[in-house]
Image (cartoon, helix red, strand yellow):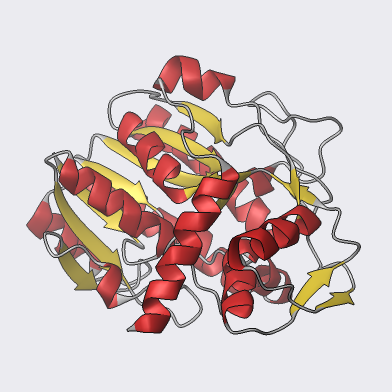
Amino acid sequence: MRILITGGAGFIASHIAEAYIAAGHEVLIVDNFWSHGGARREHVPPQARLVELDIRDAALAHVFTAFQPEIISHHAAQHSVAIGSRDPEFDANVNVLGLLNVLNQAVRVGVKKCIFASSGATFGEPDQLPMNEATPQRPASPYGITKMVTEHYLRFYRQEHGLDFTALRYGNVYGPRQDPNGEAGVISIFIGKFLAQQGVRIDSDGEQTRDYIYVGDVAQANIAALTRGGGGCYVIGTGIRTSVNEIYRALVEVTGFPAPVTHAPKRAGDVRAAQFDASLAQSELQWQPQTDLLSGMRATVAYFRGLLAQ
């Protein structure tokens, strides 16, 4: 199949691009290399075509016309909770108006399906854990709001235009290529500090928990979504709650360096706890995670050590 991946030079979507290519698909990547987005040219698989373009640009129409994609994997986004909380207008401009440009072009050229990178941030602070697809969506940040709004637009475009979709509500994704200098991704940020023999900052008391999922497992969920899950939204996680303090202790074990810790106040828009029950994805997408946290962290540390050795 011909698959157009927005944001495909970024952390998560570049792994998905590799998985699609390995499965025999033709891939075109659209990415604007936003300075805060973590996209890198070296992340683009050599077998993929690349167009440097913002998803809000009217020139996107030419890309769709020339490539005639059958599937859209929509991963381009303003993905930082912190940036979105400081600038909700910018967040909505990229995540909503950019999305609509993509969907309108998809309808125009007859795309069959859009696979969307949604987020557990759409749930906000849940009444109970684990969260599943029936958990009420009460996002606590502009980022989470725009991800939830996108799911509603996808339902509308499916009903009105016949554009199928599968939305994947990711837990906290980590792994090789995640930007250690960004504002999101505590594991990669910590790894960058640990390997540089620097101290780390832990917000609040460090007992806030997340469901951390390895990027390779997320890529496999996107493979499954090519042919399954039409019209569905699925939580993608491990079912395991891990605190920031536990992440810290695991990295001390993996790296052998007890990084000094300073504490900071709770970040705006952050929720206290997250955990997913991915039973529906297991039954309907025939997907389940394969990578335990310590194995994933070792692979991620090895990747960043390799970069330092270059």
Q: Quadrant of the C terminus?
A: bottom left
Asked whether the viewer can see residue 240, the reply is yes
Image x and y of residue 50, in percent: 18, 68
Q: Quadrant of the N terminus?
A: top left
**Circle count:** 0
Q: Residue 61 is drawn in which quadrant? A: bottom left
Farthest residue in the front direction?
256
Image x and y of residue 74, in percent: 38, 51
Q: From the viewer's perspective, is residue 264 above or below residue 108?
A: below
Q: In percent of the image, x 27 and y 65: which residue is there?
A: 30
Between 220 and 104, which is closer to the camera in this rendering?
220
Farthest residue in the top direction?
283
Image x and y of residue 110, in percent: 19, 40
Is 34 positioned to the left or the right of 186 in the image?
Answer: left
Q: In percent of the image, x 36 and y 56: which residue is there?
A: 13
Q: From the viewer's perspective, is residue 140 above or below residue 225?
A: below
Is 80 positioned to the left or the right of 166 in the image?
Answer: right
Farthest residue in the left direction?
66
Between 298 and 81, which is closer to the camera in this rendering?
298
Q: Residue 264 is drawn in which quadrant? A: bottom right
Is 185 positioned to the left or the right of 252 in the image?
Answer: left
Q: In percent of the image, x 58 and y 48: which residue is there?
A: 294
Q: In percent of the image, x 67 and y 73: which residue is there?
A: 257
Between 232 and 207, which is closer to the camera in this rendering?
207
Image x and y of residue 4, in percent: 23, 52
Asked whether the viewer can see residue 182, the reply is no
